[in-house]
Image: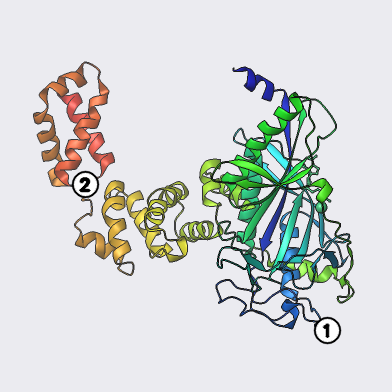
Amino acid sequence: MSSSESILNKYELIIGLEVHAQLATNTKIFSSDPAHFGAEPNQHTSPVSLGLPGALPKINEQVVVFAIKMGLATHCNINLVNRFDRKNYFYADLPKGYQITQDELPICQGGYIKLIAKDKSERKIRINRIHMEEDAGKSLHDKDDTYSLIDLNRAGVPLIEIVSEPDIRSAEEAGACLAEIRKLVKYLGICDGNMEEGSLRCDANISVRLKGEKAFGNRCEVKNLNSIRNLQRAINFEFQRQVGLVEAGEKVEQNTLNFDSATGVTLALRSKEMAYDYRYFPEPDLPPLHLTKEWIAGLKKELPELPESRMQRYTGQYKLSEYDASILTSEREIADYFEAVVKHTTSYKASANWMIGPIQSYLNETGKTIGDFPIPTATLATVISLVDKGMINNTAAVQQVFPALIQNPKIDVMTLVQQMNLLIDTNNDDLGKYINEAISTYPDKVKEYHTGKKGVLGLFMGEIMRLSKGKIDPKTANKLVVEKLESLK
Ligand code: ADP
Ligand code: MG
């Protein structure tokens, strides 16, 4: 261990995340402007999002529904009375001169996100709050030589902000927490989770302290991390930087930082002395929200089954490994496809193998999502059961039937398998012939087998498969070849 490593080892990281998720509503949070991305600049605007005098905001009910769903999915309390506040600051892409957000009385408080580490230990990262707010517009600094340009299409697009307690203790855990949030918003269908396009953005509050110490150190806040990898790089950089300062007897200044992904370095944006005074006060143009328990109970019923519960079902009911279950539940659409397959077959493990193996490779290679995957679930289940019954062999199913079905997904599987001449004849008359041929090709290997080298069996099986063009049942072949070899002793 190098000396710098042993110094780092004396310290521990304290991290709290603030995650902004752009909500997938049709319209903006306080007006009927379209909320989606991709229009010509300043087309999605109206007096409300332009901040014209006298224009009044009106809450979009869908935003409240989405915020509550995220709160329920993360075990939060929903505040039946909650309200909006003004956060005042000056910036060119904020036409009103304030952002409408929630400060003292957010819609959700006090939940948690459960993380399962590689060693299977469980950690709960507490959530301080989830609140609703509006996004600002966008300043474009590189489109014109003289001026910065402003696009207000994004002004008023709804966001929820999820604020964790400072419970996270490593870059790895921070990454897992952000990944879990991303998975949840996508499961709930409230945000597309796309970090590159900025639909999901993460700020990380980071401090260090000597292990065993109770008090937290001064924290820095790294803004706008646009990927899980960059979140982790920023944390690791800050860990070294802050430990370096403390070891040198200097103080960590409470700063807002930017992360430069090209160099992997954080840079000060503004220091605490320059911190804004936001002069929060209750938004006078919007009445507080009064929600009922019954309404929230109704929303709870609308929630899809969440990954945590599916994980339990997959490892319990389907007897899958945690690894398989975690991959299958990583995306709701993948899990839904898998569940549709196992409605037709009880070969859970084989179905999982198809999802994680050939289907995932196909999706990776083509850049498609499971939503575009052409093979109907019942068709895949038929292929799986043909393999199960020993009517086609698994290699032929993966290498020949699967690509043929992708080309022609509507075809009847039995017809296809017959056309491709892949049906195994369980009383294959030629099997004996192939076995004899394989054995006579490798007399030396037969001797090796008889001296106890059972490994050569693989060679005979490979040869038999080759000769039969995959049309024999491997189990039967294996049994017969062993019998034959034993009989030659
Ligand atoms: P503020 O009101 O200044 O924004 P908060 O108390 O709301 O501060 O915390 C903002 C975020 O910073 C939260 O995610 C919280 O978990 C995190 N945080 C607070 N103190 C620390 C600390 N000492 N080290 C790391 N993160 C912290
Ligand atoms: Mg705060």
How is the rendered protein coloured? rainbow
Label 2 environment density (alpha carbons within 10 Å; few <14, some 14–19, many ≥20): many
In the rendered structure, which amino acid carries the disc numbered 2? Gly
Which residue occupies the extreme front position in the image?
Answer: 146
At which x and y percent is residue 191? 63, 64
Tell me which residue sits at (79%, 25%) in the image: 249
Q: Nearer the viewer, residue 251 or 25?
A: 251
> Is residue 243 placed above or below 50 in the rendered structure?
above
Q: Quadrant of residue 208?
A: top right
Query: Which residue matches tag 2?
Result: 470
Q: Quadrant of the N terminus?
A: top right
- Residue 310 visible in this rendered orientation of the protein: yes
Asked if residue 156 is positioned above or below residue 424 in the image, the reply reads: below
Q: Amino acid at mark 1?
A: Gly
Distance (Cα) linking label 1 and label 2: 77 Å
Is 427 or 414 nearer to us in this picture?
414
Q: Which corner quadrant of the image does residue 11 belong to?
A: top right
Q: Is residue 81 left or right of residue 112?
A: right
Ligand 2 within 8 angstroms of badge 1 C-beta: no
Q: Is residue 427 left or right of residue 314?
A: left
In the rendering, which numbered label is found on residue 291? none
Mark 1 highlights which residue?
54
Marks 1, 2: nearer the viewer? 1
